[in-house]
């Protein structure tokens, strides 16, 4: 047999811890804070007990989880032999174990908790636990034990032998050594007076006596002496009339629990006789009756019997009323009873007068009355000023007529009407106007509505705690609230907005509006004292960024689990959240997630960031404008510094020149020219022509015609100029102020003016060596003026870095193979 070891990882234990703490908070909140469904006088003790119980279980689980083995419901017929020796908690309940042996547990030296309930064990020898010196908790209930052999397991604190087949109480002399025993559960079919004598010196906190199989003749009465216990719990046969006749003597009994009580008018006195000795002492203050079926007459008799007893708290759970309900006489004498609680009533009597039933409770002169989970449809107003300070009518079918015009509940401080049939908030307010001491009102889980006409709600001003949760209230509820309320619960309603003209609730300190339909956090202008705000599970997607500025007294806020839209509008709110203490912000950061846009869904708000530039339109425009301005200024500076326009112009000229040369038909050029270019220039510019222009061109195999080198002697200058221009593919004119003033140039320009300088000519290359003022060109050279304004010319750059592009433009003009005249003559011959 392989056992299931419960060795949780750190992660799983952490998850359990979080869930446990959450459940503890919910449980304590429900029972101790909001609902206040416990009587005011015992509420603090109850909450303290509940807190201690839950934390104790939590600590126990924490301590046991690492060394716990769960083998319950596994069909075991014997104790496994392979149990780990370090186990401290072993659960083998709800199996088929028949017997226990010493060897079963001898190796489990650290065993503290052993659960063996709901098996088939018939005999028990306590010696099987001889080696378990740390065993504190032993549960053997719901087996078939008939006898036991005793051995003192002195470490036991909890021993449960109830719901077995013992004929007498199984208390051995050795039990006298169980001085740490706190809980003792037993079964028996009959009693003897000194059955519990071995444990008489031990102060037990709880004794459970299962009398499900108890039987004694009708005329026979037994005695049982129980010296010291705080709580005594009897469980009687579930389907038999109450017939237990035992005189029980208890010295220090404080709490008495009786389960399974069936009464009618004939055997009602048997129960009162059973209670007579138990209620004689002054220490019994609390009686709880569970699973009670009785007639109305018998129930009233039990009330009357206990009215004069020292009992202060009477609790009845699962009450069934049978036969009939008639008016019964009752003397409301002075009583020590403070609180009566009746929960879950089944009334099998359908025809009765409301006075017979409701007046019985309405006239009780006690402080606290709880009647919940019944079919009661009404409650009468007390006929005289009542002593009620606490009323709890949870889960009945009361309507708006409850306590209308009732002026005798003058001491009532807490009134709970959860889960009834209330519909009008206005009538609820009217109900309270005659309750001058009312401080806490809980009308949650009803069908309450608020309308605009309810702006004239009349509330008693003493209310400080109001629970209106789980109704169908809308925004107008804020116009119908008690003026001095401090704690207001409106969660789970239909509120979409808090009106700006809401009545100022200056005293409001705690506001719960969770699970509504609000789209923004409320400001604190109407709630100047607000310190606690719960607004989770709403529709808040763009909360106001100035919330914390207006709500400077907030010490706790829970705004998690809302559909936050992580856009620019949320950026400022998230920044403000980051400045709030984690003690103030409940659920941070786990409950605060992006819901939109889809790419950010599930992202924690703490990880959501957007730059100021992307969220500020004005700043974005200014930034773009400044960037463009800087870029423009930078480009302008670079253009001026690097002379970019000149480069662009030269590049354009080079491209145009390449295109023009490609468009000239080759047959028009072959065999026509002897030179690639004729250069016309002023003698004063000859140094540049001979040192720069000519070497560069001839290096590229470009044939150049110069007047001093290629003019034919004996011919006139004009004739030489004409011959050179006609025999050259291009004519290059080096323009400068010197060119304009040169006499030779005048002849060359004159010829060019009459022969070559016509529009559309592509054989002309103008090089501007130096700038020529427009007014320095003679008027007779108007064609030159026109060409310089219409045609593109090449400027000689003074910067050496630009020379490369200049020469590239010159070479582009000669991007064609020409046939020299000599070659042409050879082809003809």
Image (tube, helix red, strand yellow):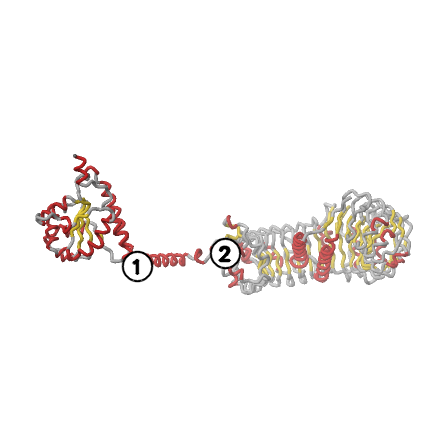
Cα distance in 3D space between marks 1 and 2: 42 Å
Q: Position of residue 208 (x, y in %)?
A: 82, 53
Query: Measured from the top left, where is residue 755 in percent x and y?
Result: 12, 45
Q: In terms of secondary structure, where does tag 2 sit?
A: loop
Horizontal side of residue 592 vs 115, given as left or right: left
Horizontally, residue 240 falls left or right of residue 398, namely right
Q: Residues within 10 Å of mark 1 (few under 14, many from 20)?
A: few
Q: Secondary structure at mark 1?
A: helix
Residue 662, by quadrant, is top left
User: In the rendered image of this protein, does residue 403 appear above or below residue 347?
Assistant: below
Q: Nearer the viewer, residue 36 or 262?
A: 36
**Residue 804 picture location, percent across and down:** 28, 52
- Mark 2, Cα crowd under 10 Å, few <14 / some 14-19 / many 20+, is some
Q: Which mark is residue 641?
A: 1
Q: Which mark is residue 666?
A: none
> Mark 1 or 2, which is nearer the eye?
1
Q: Report whether residue 328 is seen.
A: no
Residue annotated with mark 2: 609
Residue 204, x across and y down, in percent: 83, 59
Looking at the figure, which quarter contains the N terminus?
A: top right
Rendered position, 727 above or below 460: above
Q: Is residue 634 visible?
A: yes
Residue nearer the viewer, 513 or 590: 590
Check if mark 1's residue and mark 2's residue have beta carbons within 8 Å.
Answer: no
């Amino acid at each position: 047999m392989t056992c299931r070891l419960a060795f949780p990882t750190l992660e799983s234990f952490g998850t359990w811890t979080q869930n446990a703490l959450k459940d503890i908070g919910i449980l304590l909140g429900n029972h101790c804070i909001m609902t206040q469904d416990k009587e005011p006088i015992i509420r603090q003790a109850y909450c303290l007990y509940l807190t201690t119980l839950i934390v104790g279980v939590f600590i126990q689980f924490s301590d046991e989880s690492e060394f716990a083995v769960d083998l319950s419901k596994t069909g075991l017929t014997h104790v496994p032999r392979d149990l780990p020796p370090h186990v401290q908690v072993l659960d083998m309940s709800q199996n088929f174990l028949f017997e226990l042996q010493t060897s079963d547990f001898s190796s489990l030296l650290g065993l503290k908790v052993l659960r063996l309930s709901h098996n088939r064990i018939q005999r028990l020898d306590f010696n099987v636990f001889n080696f378990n010196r740390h065993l504190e908790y032993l549960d053997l209930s719901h087996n078939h034990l008939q006898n036991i052999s005793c051995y003192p397991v002195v470490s036991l604190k909890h021993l449960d032998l109830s719901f077995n087949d013992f004929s007498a109480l199984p208390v051995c002399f050795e039990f006298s050594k169980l001085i740490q025993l706190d809980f003792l559960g037993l079964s028996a079919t009959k009693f003897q007076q000194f059955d519990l004598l071995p444990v008489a010196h031990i102060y037990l906190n709880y004794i459970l006596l299962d009398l499900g199989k108890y039987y004694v003749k009708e005329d026979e009465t037994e005695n049982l002496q129980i010296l010291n216990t705080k709580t005594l719990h009897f469980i009687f046969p579930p389907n038999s009339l109450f017939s237990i006749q035992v005189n029980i003597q208890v010295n220090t009994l404080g709490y008495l629990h009786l389960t399974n009580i069936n009464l009618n008018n004939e055997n009602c006195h048997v129960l009162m006789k059973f209670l007579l000795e138990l209620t004689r002492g002054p220490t019994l203050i609390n009686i709880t009756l569970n699973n009670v079926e009785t007639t109305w007459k018998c129930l009233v008799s039990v009330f009357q019997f206990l009215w004069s007893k020292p009992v202060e708290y009477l609790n009845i759970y699962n009450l069934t009323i049978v036969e009939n309900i008639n008016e019964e006489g009752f003397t409301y004498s002075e009583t020590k009873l403070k609180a009566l609680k009746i929960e879950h009533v089944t009334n099998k009597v359908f025809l009765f007068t409301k006075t017979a039933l409701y007046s019985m409770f309405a006239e009780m002169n006690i402080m606290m009355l709880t009647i919940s989970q019944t079919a009661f449809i009404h409650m009468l107003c007390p006929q005289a000023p009542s002593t009620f300070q606490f009323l709890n009518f949870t889960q009945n079918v009361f309507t708006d007529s409850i306590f209308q015009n009732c002026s005798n509940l003058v001491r009532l401080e807490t009134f709970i009407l959860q889960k009834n049939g209330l519909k009008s908030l206005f009538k609820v307010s009217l109900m309270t106007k005659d309750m001058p001491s009312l401080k806490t009102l809980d009308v949650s889980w009803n069908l309450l509505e608020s309308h605009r006409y309810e702006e004239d709600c009349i509330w008693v001003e003493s209310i400080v705690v109001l629970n209106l949760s789980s109704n169908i209230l809308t925004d107008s509820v804020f116009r119908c609230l008690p003026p001095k309320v401090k704690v207001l619960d409106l969660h789970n309603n239909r509120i979409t907005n808090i009106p700006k003209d809401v009545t100022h609730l200056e005293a409001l300190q705690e506001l719960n509006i969770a699970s509504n339909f609000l789209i923004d956090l409320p400001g604190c202008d109407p709630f100047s004292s607000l310190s606690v705000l719960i607004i989770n599970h709403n529709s808040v997607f763009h909360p106001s960024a100035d919330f914390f500025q207006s709500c400077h007294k907030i010490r706790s806020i829970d705004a998690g689990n809302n559909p936050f839209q992580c856009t620019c509008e949320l950026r400022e709110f998230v920044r403000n959240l980051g400045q709030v203490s984690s003690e103030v912000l409940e659920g941070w950061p786990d409950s605060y997630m992006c819901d939109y846009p889809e790419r950010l869904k599930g992202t924690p708000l703490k990880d959501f960031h957007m730059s100021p530039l992307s969220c500020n339109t004005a700043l974005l425009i200014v930034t773009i404008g400044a960037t463009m301005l800087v870029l423009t200024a930078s480009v302008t500076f670079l253009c001026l510094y690097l002379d970019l326009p000149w480069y662009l112009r030269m590049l354009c000229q080079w491209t145009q020149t390449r295109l023009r040369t490609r468009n000239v038909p080759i047959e028009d050029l072959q065999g026509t020219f002897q030179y690639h270019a004729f250069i016309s220039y002023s003698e004063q510019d000859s140094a540049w022509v001979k040192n720069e222009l000519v070497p560069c061109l001839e290096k590229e195999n470009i044939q150049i015609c110069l007047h001093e080198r290629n003019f034919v002697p004996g011919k006139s200058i004009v004739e030489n100029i004409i011959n050179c221009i006609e025999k050259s593919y291009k004519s290059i004119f080096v323009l400068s102020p010197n060119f304009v003033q040169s006499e030779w140039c005048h002849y060359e320009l004159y010829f060019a003016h009459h022969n070559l300088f016509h529009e559309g000519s592509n054989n002309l290359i103008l090089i501007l060596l130096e700038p020529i003022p427009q007014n320095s060109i003679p008027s007779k050279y108007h064609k030159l003026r026109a060409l310089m304004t219409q045609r593109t010319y090449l400027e000689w750059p003074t910067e050496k870095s630009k020379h490369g592009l200049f020469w590239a433009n010159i070479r582009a003009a000669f991007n064609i193979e020409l046939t020299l005249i000599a070659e042409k003559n050879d082809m003809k011959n």
